[in-house]
Image (spheres, rainbow, N blue to C red):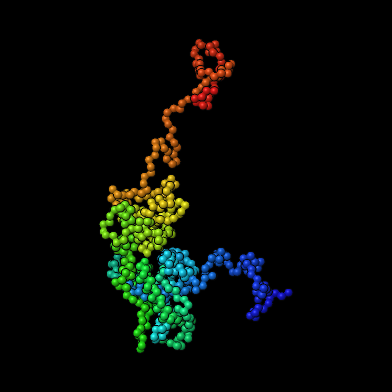
Amino acid sequence: SVFAAIDSAGNLCHKKAIVRTYFDMTQNSHSSHDRLQRIRGFTIGGKTWEREAVDAASTASPSTHFLFGSLFATFICFNGTHLGLGLGRTTLIKRGAPGSKAASISAIPLAELTLPESPFTICGQILSVLPFKVDGSEWVWDGKYVSFALKRKAKKKQGEPAAAEDVSLMQNLQLSVSSRLIVPITGDGRRDASISELEFVDNTIGFDSERDKTWIFPDKSILAAWYELKDRIEKDSTLHDKIPVFSAVNDGVFPYQAPPAEAYRGVVYSFSIVGTPIHEAIANRHTCRICGKVVKAQDIQTHMGHHIRKFLCDVPEDTPVKCPVAKSYPCGTCGRSMDDGQCNIRIKSNKCDSDCSSSYAFRISSASTFHETRPCTNVPIQCPFDCQQIHWKYNFPQHLKDRHPSWRSLASATFIDQVTVTQAEELALGIPASKAMLWPPPPPSKPPNTPTRGQKRAVPSSPRTPRRLHCKDNENGANKNPRIFLAFPGVNVASRAPRVTVVENDIDDVFV
């Protein structure tokens, strides 16, 4: 018998493969008798049939989906006053806000990238790009990535004076940006090239010797991404606080610029935002949108708690209000309504994980405890009933009213303690005692002698009425009136009345 054959390309292959190919036979590999077809390299804890079926990367294409490793363009604030266009390479795609610990995914449909409700985050590295031609018609990646700097105040060590100014704390080679702020670079937007060939044409560019290939970007594709992003952020003010912000450029070429030549004016892909709403949003990222006061990130939850409780209790603010607190489910860190899906909250490792741009990861166990210096206890709490939704503590009166009207009869003592707002908390948050809205309200008054949960009903102290006794005449069988003869000394009871049998009736007031 023949155990092997030659295919059309002249390669040696198994006879089964030849038969299936020749006769166009389709076979379900999962139910195949061939072990090699069933296993296909799947390992324990690795790829499975279910995972393969839902893996978007196996069916998605760059023409319809934004994939892992795709190139994109975005705006970056690299010094606090200017925005620069950056070309990046995707290293991670998440379903969640930047900074959140969301699950990673393999692909996003291109039609869903820029939707107002798009929850996706793109993580990537910005390419260091140089002009490849003198007239700036083409740009080339030099094989390096741009490193940005974050400046924060230096930590004061014990016995040392505080730092006079900020110092560079870390270098960032990777950034995270909302998918609403990117433009995919696909198709004619770039082309692959060999570094050895490019060095032969122009040896002035210092390519990274560890790489063999690079990308060349036509200037028209970069310019198209520039205008599209600029038009997008000018029309949608909600994107202003989603722009990545750094303090300086540590390494790499950024912003992209081509010097002027003979008949070429030159170009710099950067513009100033000073005096614009974009700069105001970036500079005031730690500014309360309700009152305009600059608040530290770790104090925003307590500060916003003052505004929310005053709004709920109808107490006027001490200062003019720029934006009112939302009436429906206000966010605990920005005051906006959570109904639009931009401020979703989660509980991860006993910490608050929120999509809100003003949020920070604080520990729920410590923030839920009342202190005079930090009186606000507005923390995320998971509803114990069937919906299992997570809401801010101050929003639970509205949630229980909307979803669980009979919650009091089902709630445990632990849950009631979690959602209780005490009078001390109200007073510390600036709520007068006359307007304090203590919640939950006290339970309705109980009737007297009503037992509480776990107690037995109280028994009246009055004695129980004894059951009546009647006498049944053995001779005539007729009912007689109750007769009880007491034996006195010297009196013969049998001589005065016939002998009767005493019977106890089961019903108190009926004679049989």
The percent coordinates of residue 336 (x first, y second) are 36, 60
Residue at 43% x, 81% y is 218
Residue at 62% x, 67% y is 29
The percent coordinates of residue 407 (x first, y second) are 43, 48
Residue at 35% x, 50% y is 421
Within the image, what quadrant is residue 58 found in?
A: bottom right
Count how many numbered circles sit on residues in the image. 0
Residue at 28% x, 55% y is 316
Q: Would residue 367 be seen by someone viewing this image from the given angle?
A: no
The percent coordinates of residue 340 (x first, y second) are 40, 61
Q: Point out the image quarter for the N terminus.
A: bottom right
Q: Point out the image quarter for the C terminus.
A: top right
Residue closest to the eye, 250 or 485: 485
Q: Residue furthest right?
A: 1
Q: Name above or below for residue 107 compared with residue 473.
A: below
For residue 164, side relative to residue 502 (left or right): left
Q: Would residue 454 be seen by someone viewing this image from the given angle?
A: yes
Within the image, what quadrant is residue 142 found in?
A: bottom left
Q: Name above or below for residue 223 compared with residue 488.
A: below
For residue 11, side relative to residue 387 (left or right): right
Q: Name above or below for residue 286 compared with residue 371.
A: below
For residue 174, side relative to residue 8 (left or right): left
The percent coordinates of residue 240 (x first, y second) are 35, 68
